[in-house]
Image (cartoon, rainbow, N blue to C red):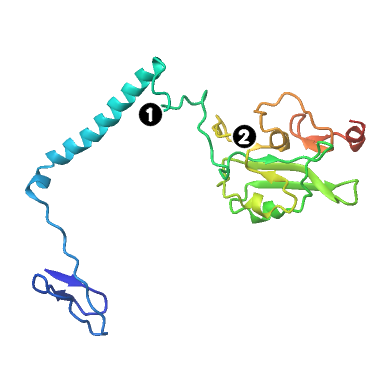
Amino acid sequence: MLSTKPGLGGGVPLPPEGGRGKEGEGGGTVKIVRRPELTFWEKLYLPQILCGLKITFGHFFRNLFLHIAHRFGRLRHLRAGVTIQYPEELRPLMSRYRSRHRLTVREDDTPRCVGCMLCETVCPAKCITIVPGEHPDPNVEKYPIRFDIDLGVCVYCGYCVEVCPEDAIRMDTGILDLAAYSREEMQLDIHELMDPELRKPISECGLDFPHRCEVTGGGMKGSWDAVEGS
């Protein structure tokens, strides 16, 4: 039996039982790792199977006993194994979990996004599309006329959230049901990003500021006068 190591020109014979490794040409030591041999009972595999069944039945009967006890109002301080009834019941998510995107808004219900294009530039999947427009407020300068995210391409890396200087985009909606029947339904526009509860098809537009409205065929809709009036 030989133990090989690159640079030694072949295999190095194994030392006697309990012996030490052999020094190589470069002064290094070849460490021999022996495969542990199975015992007679381990070769039968039956003890390992019985050990696994013991653990499985232990959990089964413990949970069965506790569930019955809970039915009668007993031992409620001991939690039994439960099945989460999704989608009626949702598992609690970690605070850092990256779920579906949303755009944050200002006090006048306009997006906080200033159209700097940083999120679109840093996105490794190139799934973000932004068309900026001039904002009437010189302190804001720009805003998104169009803001689309293709969830079918997004890798949920969170780079868009980290790079945004205005905290205009977040991934804290807790929405996990991202499945759709077509690729078009996976593409979120500015309506769905500002109101994550919306689902396609969207029947009416509730945005007042000027934007490219896909609900009405992709033309411009809204005015800043409507925003100031509201």
Q: Which mark is residue 14?
A: none
Q: Residue 117: x, y in percent?
A: 73, 53
Residue at the spot of label 2: 184
Specify whether 146 is left or right of 139. Answer: left
Q: Are marks 1 and 2 in contact (CB under 8 Å)?
A: no
Relative height, residue 138 to residue 26 (above, below): above
Query: For the residue marked with disc 2, what is the amino acid?
Result: Glu
Q: Residue at x 12, y 52 (%)?
A: 38
Q: Secondary structure at mark 1?
A: loop
Q: Residue 201: x, y in percent?
A: 66, 26
Return the residue nearer the eye: 13 or 88. Answer: 88
Nearest to the eye among marks 1 and 2: give it.
Answer: 1
Q: Residue 215: x, y in percent?
A: 74, 29
Return the residue nearer the eye: 44 or 193. Answer: 44
State which tag comes first along the sequence, 1 or 2. Answer: 1
Q: Residue at x 59, y 40 (%)?
A: 151
Q: Which mark is residue 81?
A: 1
Specify whether 119 is left or right of 105. Answer: left
Q: Secondary structure at mark 2?
A: helix
Label 2 crowd (10 A; few <14 / some 14-19 / many >=20): few
